Amino acid sequence: MKKIEAIIRSEKLGEIKKALAIAGFIGLTTYEVKGRGRQKGVVLQYRTQEYRVDMLAKTKIELVVDDAGVEKVIKIICESGRTGNIGDGKIFILPIEEIVRVRTGERGKEAI
């Protein structure tokens, strides 16, 4: 089992969520986050004055999938979240040792 964490453009959340659901990946958690990477922020103008915003609003998606579903989820997030511009995001894959469903006590793959 793997935990997939993806930092994406906030406006792409609906499209990614819909594509994941169609593929059978229903359960996920989202967070509103701020961060910066190679994009290094943006320069905005307000009333003739320029200023730099270097911590941009993004959305973080987390979901846990069976090892067999990892590549499919990565493909879905990349295809649905890509604009082709800098700042499209990153995907991180982490190993999961165990999952326990609180309500039933189920463990492992059944608890996903």
Image (cartoon, rainbow, N blue to C red):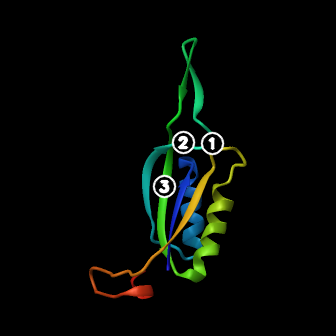
Could you give the CA–CA distance between mark 1 and mark 2, rounded to whole angstroms?
7 Å
Q: Secondary structure at mark 2?
A: loop
Q: Is residue 65 above or below residue 13?
A: below
Q: Are marks 3 and 1 in contact (CB under 8 Å)?
A: no
User: Mark 3 = which residue?
Assistant: 60
Residue type at tag 2: Arg
Image location (x, y in percent) of residue 53: 52, 30
Residue at 54 percent of width and 62 percent of height = 17
Image location (x, y in percent) of residue 5: 51, 62
Residue at 53 percent of width and 74 percent of height = 25
User: Mark 2 = which residue?
Assistant: 36
User: Mark 1 = which residue?
Assistant: 38
Image location (x, y in percent) of residue 78: 66, 61
Crowd band around label 1 with a 10 angstrom C-alpha radius: few (<14), some (14–19), many (20+): few
Residue type at tag 3: Lys
Could you give the CA–CA distance between mark 3 and mark 2, rounded to whole angstroms?
13 Å
Q: Is residue 11 above or below residue 102?
A: above
Residue at 55 percent of width and 63 percent of height = 92
Q: Secondary structure at mark 1?
A: loop
Q: Is residue 89 above or below residue 43?
A: below
Could you give the CA–CA distance between mark 3 and mark 1, rounded to whole angstroms?
17 Å
| In front of the other: 40 or 7 | 40
- Sequence-first tag of 3 and 2: 2
Residue at 69 percent of width and 49 percent of height = 83
Q: Secondary structure at mark 3?
A: strand
